[in-house]
Structure formats: C-alpha cells, structure tokens
Image (tube, rainbow, N blue to C red):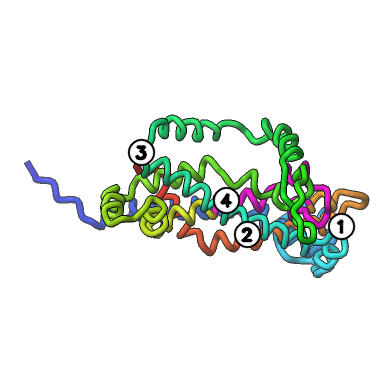
Amino acid sequence: MTPRSPRSPATSAPPTAARRLTGHALRLVLALFFAFPVVFMLVSSFKPDQQIFGDLGSPRAFLPVGSLSLENYTAVFDRVPAVRFLLNSLGVSAITILLGLLVNSLAAFALSRMRWPGRKLLLTVIIATLIVPFETFALPMVWWVNKLPWLELNGFSLTLTEGWLDTYRVQVLPFVANAFSIFLFHQYFQSIPKELDEAALIDGAGWFGIYRRIVMPLSGPAIATVAILTFLPAWNSYLWPLMVVQDEELRPVMVGIQYFFQLNVSWGQIMAYSSMITVPVLALFLAFQRSFINSIASSGVKG
C-alpha cells in the first residue's frame, strides 16, 4: 500500500488567505454601507437643494461634484444660534460626565467593596431599572422637576424657589445617576483584589481613602467606558430638553434641528447643521475607538 504523502503547507495556505481576504472584503462592504448616510450628509451640506434632489438615485449623491459652496454653513448661523447651542451641549455633557463618574463610582464602590445587608438586593433593583424605557416616566419626571425646590442667590440673600424648568440643572441632575454606569463600575471593582482593602484598613485608611487612593486609580478602563457612554446620550438628548426647556438661550444642539423645519425648509442647511453636530463626535470616537473597545472588553463581564 502506497503511503500518502504529507500535506504540504502550500496546499493549506491558499484557503486561509482566501478566508482572510473574504473577511476583509466583507468588513469593508459593511463599513461602506454604514458610512453611506454620513457621506451623503457631508457631501449634501455643500450643495444647493436643487442639486441634492437632482443627484438622488445616482452615484453623484455621494460625490462632491457640481455646484459646491459654504453657503449652507453660513446660512445655519443666520438661522439659529448654533454657537450657543453647541456651548450648551458641551457644558451639559461635561458636567453630566463629571458628576456621573463621581456618583456612580461611589455607589458601585459601596455595592462591591463594602459589606452591608441588602446590597445584593439593591443592586438587583438598580439593574432591573434598565428595562424601563425613558418615555414611560418622562411625563412624571416633568411634573416632579416642576415641584422641586432650589436655593437661588439674590444679592446677599438666599431665596427658596420652586421648579427647575428652563434651567441647566434640569438637563443635568436627573441623568447623573445611571444604572448601567453603576453596573459597569461594580463589575470592574469586583475584579480588583479585596486584599488591597484589608491592607489599607490595617494601615488606618478609611473607606473613602480606599476609594480615592486605591480603587479609582486602578479603574482607568471603567472610567473611560462610563465617560463615553455618558457623553453620547447627553450630547444626543432631544426629547427631554424639548419638554423642559423653552428658553432659546438654554437649548442644546439637538433641539436646534426643529428650527430648520419651520417656514421654508432647506435640506442643504439641515445637512450642514447635522454635519456640524455629528462629524466632530464621530471623529472623536474614531480617534479613541481602540481605547473604547479595550475599556468595554476589560470592564463589561468581570466578576
């Protein structure tokens, strides 16, 4: 019986290379598919309305060809206070992130590192709130924030007022505590050895000292994850500001979109405004996508 010759490496190499090439081609097709709306928006922001509709149904809709200008962008600033809206969203998002990191990490620290009765039940209740959609309690929240008190400084005296509508705080404080952020911090804190806490307690450190000097410095990936996941909904917030903010000086960028659907609708201006509020965020995500993916992988399922 003639022995079979061993299979040469060259024989198995082409299928592996072909599979890799197929995988790269599939990912490229998917990337182009999801990039088409962004490319169309960006290219259309430089075209007049007539050309936008004229190019529909042809590849020209995705190509920077024809009569291109910055007229739509200049018209945006004449139609809406875009700079004010951008600053409002940046401020609201930044404050929400800072307060959210502090509050949610403290809550997760108490739930994961400290021992007290009922903490597992409380964590279960917090996680269960994730299944409740925001729209179901949006109207009750509007009623409550309209009744909440607030101390205001008038001259040299403090005055107790009622109602948070038409303020910056109504856009920030209701969204500081977040169940998903608490869960992410809790899972990551669980992966940090508890022996560090015991050694710190023996050395005379308190729980807040352990939180500030040991746990948080070791939780960089979790902090990055929570910061990104807090920024995106804060920046994209539309329904809540539309319900609680009527003063134009306090509105965020997303509410500004409705200005372009009043009176004469200009789709070129809509595309220009959408590009202004989308492309910077998209560029930021692409720049830090590796850190974002690594932080999700390292903080999502530990413990």
At mark 1, the secondary structure is: helix
Circle on res. 50: 1
Nearer the observer: mark 2 or 3; the answer is 3
Mark 3 and 4 residues: CB-CB less than 8 Å, in contact?
no
Residue closest to the far left: 1
At mark 3, the secondary structure is: loop
Residue 118 falls in image quadrant: top left
Circle on res. 66: none
Residues at marks 4 and 2, CA–CA distance in whole angstroms: 13 Å
Q: Nearer the viewer, residue 228 or 158?
A: 158
Q: Nearer the viewer, residue 186 or 211?
A: 211
**Residue in the picture at 37% in, 57% down:** 218
Q: Nearer the viewer, residue 153 or 190?
A: 153
Against 173, residue 128 (above or below) is above
Nearer the observer: mark 1 or 3; the answer is 3
Mark 1 and 4 residues: CB-CB less than 8 Å, in contact?
no
Residues at marks 2 and 3, CA–CA distance in whole angstroms: 40 Å
- Who comes first in sequence, dot 3 or dot 4? 3
Residues at marks 1 and 3, CA–CA distance in whole angstroms: 67 Å
Residue that carries the numbered disc 4 in the rendered image: 230
Circle on res. 115: 3
- Who comes first in sequence, dot 1 or dot 4? 1
User: Does the segment drawn in magenta span residue 236?
Assistant: yes
Residue that carries the numbered disc 2 in the rendered image: 281
Residues at marks 2 and 1, CA–CA distance in whole angstroms: 29 Å
Against 69, residue 117 (above or below) is above
